[in-house]
Image: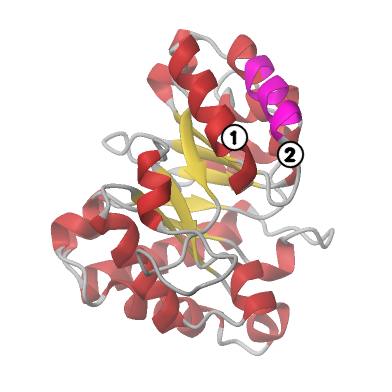
Amino acid sequence: MATERLPIISGNWKMNNNHFEAIQCVQKLAYLLQKEDFDAVEVTVHPPFTDLRSMQTLIDADQLRIRLGAQNCHPEEKGAFTGEVSPVFLAKLGVHFVIVGHSERREHFGETDEFVARKVAAVQKHGMTPILCVGETLAERESGVALDKVRHQVRVALEKRSSDQVKSMVIAYEPIWAIGTGKNATATDAQEVVAAIREEVAAVVSRPAAQSVRIQYGGSVKAGTAAEFMRQPDIDGLLVGGASLDPTEFARIVQYRRHAY
């Protein structure tokens, strides 16, 4: 992992934890993490929308160094989009990071690469940082088109972004076949694709953007595997799913330097 890029470890809670459970979870996480952990790693937590106000109040009142994130947003600021959440609303709640293009959104809700690109633009327009998710299915990996699929997702999302805009964002590589399936990508697998993502950023945007953008790996990450992924030269962080619901496990992931196996 390049020393000039501050590692970023994010917890995606998905559709888990009501606002009471969310408060307890973050309070325990904050208790387990020390100043040196926050100095070494940027920590973001992405609860459901209904928890965001409670999380904002807790983080502000206790002056926690945990960064508040959201799991999704709509690209439009307002309008007749029943059930959707505007990026304007998220920015007003002190949200710093927004996950866009997660594989579950792409697969279950039919989000296209072009729609995800609009979300990237909307998140940045309102002063937040997108965590752009890209990744391939098992069929795509087995047929040898994994890198082509991921490069295309990156290209569409970033081709209208400036170099400075891309420098400040986060990309998360999440192989769909390794999310909640019991199958695991190796650190070598992840590094190969993340390196290809960085090269695609250089080709589409600029070499300085590619050198600065932070790229996470996500896919059934556990405390026991975190250090191995973080040792890879192009991996700057982790997007953690189920393990982030357990404050003790998630804290150990954040503290991967101390708990290397």
Q: Is 158 a magenta residue?
A: no
Q: Magenta segment range?
A: 19-28
Secondary structure of the residue carrying numbered label 1: helix
Q: Which of 84 and 255 lies nearest the eye of the viewer?
A: 84
As displayed, is residue 183 above or below residue 46? below
Q: Which mark is residue 243?
A: 2
Tell me how far mark 1 sits from mark 2, CA to CA: 15 Å
Secondary structure of the residue carrying numbered label 2: helix
The percent coordinates of residue 40 (x first, y second) are: 41, 22
Q: What secondary structure do most residues of the magenta stretch adopt?
A: helix
Residue 100 horizontal side relative to residue 29, left or right: left
As displayed, is residue 251 above or below residue 209? above
Q: Is 26 a magenta residue?
A: yes
Q: Which residue is mark 1?
A: 227
As displayed, is residue 41 above or below residue 48? above
Q: Which of 108 and 231 lies nearest the eye of the viewer?
A: 108
Outermost residue on the front side: it is: 80
* Position of the N terminus by quadrant: top left
Which callout, 1 or 2, points to the residue nearer the camera? 2
The percent coordinates of residue 170 (x first, y second) are: 38, 52
N-terminal of the pair, mark 1 or mark 2, is 1
Residue 126 horizontal side relative to residue 255, left or right: left
